[in-house]
Image (spheres, rainbow, N blue to C red):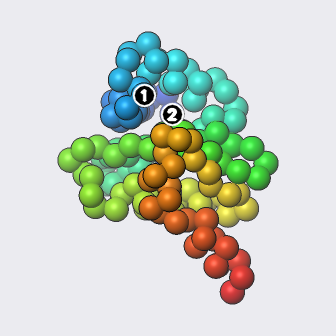
């Protein structure tokens, strides 16, 4: 289940974000968390299964698009489709928006092929 980030989830969110290649440095990680907490167009979502938070997806949002800034899954839960499920849930939550990627998230978003799925649903 996709849930919005709350301050009480800060430690788990930072842990998941630290798996991103560009977020290894603590100062950079703290800056990123501050952006998600303070900037209105930066939104962080966590993926919860049962009682455990095992993934996150962070986006910047505009009128027409949501750019995937970060996507991370706990290593012990990888290769189970959780990342794709998070992207699909995000697309369903914001059906009018096109999902785009950064250079860092592009390869993963292309694997998800979510924008083509949305177009197909809209043309039915």
Q: Quadrant of the C terminus?
A: bottom right
- Front residue of 65/45: it is 65
Residue at left 55%, top 65%? 114
Q: Position of residue 98 (x, y in %)?
A: 68, 57
- Mark linked to residue 22: 1
Residue that carries the numbered disc 2 in the rendered image: 6
Asked whether, in this view, residue 103 is left or right of residue 38, the answer is left
How many numbered marks does the figure carry?
2
- Residue 51 visible here: yes
Nearer the observer: mark 1 or 2; the answer is: 1
Q: Position of residue 73 (x, y in %)?
A: 34, 46
Q: Position of residue 24 (x, y in %)?
A: 35, 23
Residue at left 33%, top 34%? 19
Quadrant position of residue 39: top right
Label 2 packing within 10 angstroms: few (<14), some (14-19), many (20+): few
Quadrant position of residue 68: top right
């Amino acid at each position: 289940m996709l849930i919005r980030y709350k301050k009480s989830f800060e430690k788990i969110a930072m842990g998941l974000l630290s798996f991103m290649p560009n977020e290894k440095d603590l100062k950079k990680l703290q800056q990123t968390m501050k952006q998600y907490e303070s900037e209105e167009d930066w939104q962080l979502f966590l993926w919860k299964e049962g009682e455990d938070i095992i993934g996150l997806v962070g986006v910047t949002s505009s009128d027409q698009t949501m750019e995937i800034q970060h996507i991370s899954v706990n290593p012990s839960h990888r290769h189970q489709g959780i990342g794709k499920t998070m992207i699909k849930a995000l697309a369903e939550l914001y059906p009018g928006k096109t999902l785009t990627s950064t250079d860092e998230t592009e390869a993963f978003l292309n694997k998800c092929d979510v924008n083509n799925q949305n177009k197909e649903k809209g043309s039915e």
